[in-house]
Image (tube, rainbow, N blue to C red):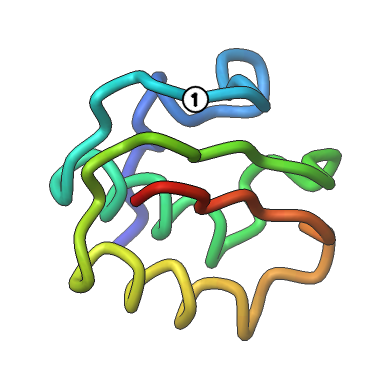
Amino acid sequence: EHSTPDPMFTSVNLKRDLNENRIKEPGVLKLAAALQTNCDSSLTALNLSRNPIGDFGAQHLGVALKTNSTLTSLNLDRN
């Protein structure tokens, strides 16, 4: 089954600097899913500093990065 990508995380709308955007676990799970499928193949750096993503969200990002081939810099400072 093919699902429609969430418009918040498509290549047109995905911001590179999401510092202090109050992204919590539900939001980071969607972001991790987008990163895992390389939905934005031009994204090379992502700043998620100062967001309460939690341990569970960080684990999902880690899983996503195992298959993401374009992201080379991820800032998780103060999470």
Q: Residue at x 20, y 60 (%)?
A: 54
Against 1, residue 56 (above or below) is below
Task: Decide if residue 4 is on the left or right side of residue 73.
Answer: left
Task: Decide if residue 56 is on the left or right side of residue 42.
Answer: left
Query: Label 1's element?
Result: loop
User: Where in the figure is residue 8, as x and y percent of width and height?
Assistant: 40, 21
Foreground of the two, 50 or 62: 50
User: Where in the figure is residue 73, as x and y percent of width and height?
Assistant: 78, 55
Against 14, residue 13 (above or below) is above
Foreground of the two, 33 or 3: 33
Q: Residue at x 56, y 56 (%)?
A: 35
Task: Decide if residue 48 is on the left or right side of residue 79.
Answer: right
Quadrant in which residue 67 is drawn? bottom right
- Image quadrant holding the N terminus, namely bottom left
Q: Residue at x 48, y 78 (%)?
A: 62
Check disc 1 and report the residue beneath it: 19
Crowd class of label 1 (few under 14; some 14 to 19; many from 20; radius 10 Å): some
Q: Give the amino acid type for the residue marked by disc 1 in the picture.
A: Asn
User: Where in the figure is residue 74, as x and y percent of width and height?
Assistant: 66, 54
Task: Decide if residue 57 is on the left or right side of residue 38.
Answer: left
Quadrant in which residue 24 is drawn? top left
Q: Residue at x 22, y 71 (%)?
A: 55
